[in-house]
Amino acid sequence: MALPREPRQKMINIMYLVLTAILALNVSAEVINAFKTVDRSLRNSNDNLSNSNNTLYKSLSDKVNDPQTHEKAVYWNQKAVEAQNYSAAINNYINGLKDQVKKEADLKIKNGVEDYKEDYLEASTRVFENNGKGKELYDSLQKYIKDMLGIDSSINTTFKTNFPVDMSVPPTHSGNEFTGNIIQDWTNSYFHMTPTVAALTMLSKFQNNVKNAENQVVTYCHNQVGAVKVVYDQFAALVGQSSNYVMPGQEIEITAGVGAYSKAAQPDITINGAGASLDADGRAVYKFNASGGGDHSVPVNVTYTKPDGTKETKSFDVKYTVGTPGGAAVMVDKMNVFFIGLPNPVTISSGTGWDKTHVSISGGTLTPAGGPGKYNVTVSSPGKATITVNADGKASTYDFRIFRIPDPILKVGPSAGGRIQSVIFKNQQFARADLENFYYDTRFSVISATVYFSGANFASVQTASISGGSLAGLSAQLSKCIPGTSVTFDNVKVQGPDGTVRTIPGPGFILY
C-alpha cells in the first residue's frame, strides 16, 4: 500500500501501525506469561509426584527387609523398579528435547540464568518437524506405554484403558486439516509454529503424564504387598483329646496349648463340610448330634490370613466314638433328613448280627456303601422316607424327612454382594455358586447370568452376560470399573448335583 502524500495523513497512518504493533506485543506478552505460569505449575506438580514416588520406593524397600512381607515385596519391588527405570529414561529424553528447543531459540546463559526467544515460532517447528523429533517423541511415548503395561499382566488389566499418558491427536491450534498421518498430525497439533515457551510447556505436560503414570503403577505395586497387618488380639487355652469314648486298655492322647484369634484375620472355617460362623472371639463353634456306632472323625478346615497378608489352610480330624445300643438302630451320618440328588450316608446297626438282620426302605433307594451297616440313601421327591430294620424277627421303622437342596449364593471373590474394593473386584476371574452352612460338601456350577454395569465411568447402563463361571467375557467392562461403579448380576442360572437347573437371585456390588 502506497503512503499518502500529505504529511499529516502519513503521520496518522504511521501512528496507527505503531499502535497496532504495540497492541500485538501486549497480547503476545500476556500469552507468554500464561504459558510460563502453566509450565511452572507443571514442574511443581512433577516435583510433588517425584517426592510421592520416592516415599513409595522407600516403603517397598522396607517391606523387602521385613521378614513378614519379604516374599511378596521382593516380586513387587522389582516391578516398581522397572517402572522407575522406564519413567526416568523417558523423562531424561524429554529434558534433552527441551535443551534442543532452547538452543534453536538462541539460548544464552547470563549470570547462570537462561535467556532465549520465548515467542520465537520457528524453534519448535525446526526441532520437531524439520529434524524429525516429533516422530521420535511419539514413538518413544508409545514404547513407554507398552513397556509400563508389560511389567505385569495385572498392571496391564488395571491400566490399559485409562493409562495417564494420552497419545490422541488434539485439534490443531492453527486450524489446519488433518493429513491422515497420525504421527504427523500429532506433531503439527502440538509443535507446528508454536512459540518456544508453549513448546516447552507441552513437553512439561508429557513429563507430568509420565510422573503420574509412574505414581499410579508404583502405588499399585505397593498395594499388592499388603498395607494392613493382622493383629491377633484374642487368646484362649486349647485342650483336645484323641477320643471321647474308649474301652479299658485303649490309649488316650491329650493335647494342650494357647491359641490366638482375630476376626481381622478373616478365617474361613468348615466343619464336617459345612461353613461355621464365628463367635465374638473369632472362634467357630459347631454342634451336632452323634450318630452311627463305632469310631468317627469330623474333618475341620481352617483358612486364615497370616500377619504377612498371605493365606494358609490347616486341616484336622476330630475323632470320637459312639457306643452301639442293644437291638437295631438307624443313625443318619449327616442330618436327620435326606436331600434330593445326593447320596445320603447312613449307618445301621444290629445287636443280633447281620445274618439275622434285613433292611428295606420306602420312598427311596438303599445302596451298600462298603462295610457292615453302611448305606447310601437316594431320594427323588420331597416328602418322607421310611427305613425298616428287621433284626431277629423284630421290626423297627425310622421315618426321615426329604428336602430339596437349598439354593446356593452367587459370589465373586470373597463377597456375596455389597461394598467391595474396586481393585479386588476387577482382579476376579470367576463367579461361583456357594452353598453356605450346608451339611454336605456338594457343589453347584454357574451356567449363565446377565450382568449390569452402571455408575462411575459408565455414562449409561451397560449390559453383558457370562456363560459358565468365567468372567473373561466381562473384561472390557471390568477394566472400566472404578470406585463408585455398581455391578449387578441378574437371571443367574445354576446347576445342582442332581442335574437340575435353577434360577437364583443375583447379588449387587458397589465398588469403592
Image: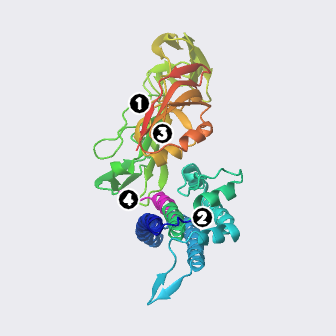
Please state, as top left, top right, bottom left or bottom right, where the C terminus lies in the image.
Answer: top left
**Residue type highlighted by circle 1:** Ala
Q: What are the residue bounds of the magenta stretch?
A: 214-230
Relative to 120, 178 lies left or right: right
Which callout, 2 or 3, points at the residue further toward the start of the chain?
Answer: 2
**Residue type highlighted by circle 3:** Ser
Q: Is residue 71 visible?
A: no
Q: Secondary structure at mark 4?
A: loop
Label 2 CA crowd tier, 10 Å (few <14, some 14–19, many 20+)? many
* Residue 345, horizontal then vertical, whole percent: 54, 26
Q: Secondary structure at mark 1?
A: loop
Q: What residue would you read off at disc 2? A: 193
For the point 56% across and 65% down, which residue is it? 194
Task: Report, in whole angstroms, how far the alpha carbon at label 2 lies from the one at label 1.
Answer: 89 Å
Which callout, 2 or 1, points at the residue further toward the start of the chain?
Answer: 2
Q: What residue would you read off at disc 4? A: 229
Q: What residue would you read off at disc 3? A: 297
Q: Is residue 165 visible?
A: yes
Q: Secondary structure at mark 3?
A: strand
In this rendering, which labeled residue sits more in front, label 3 or label 4? 4
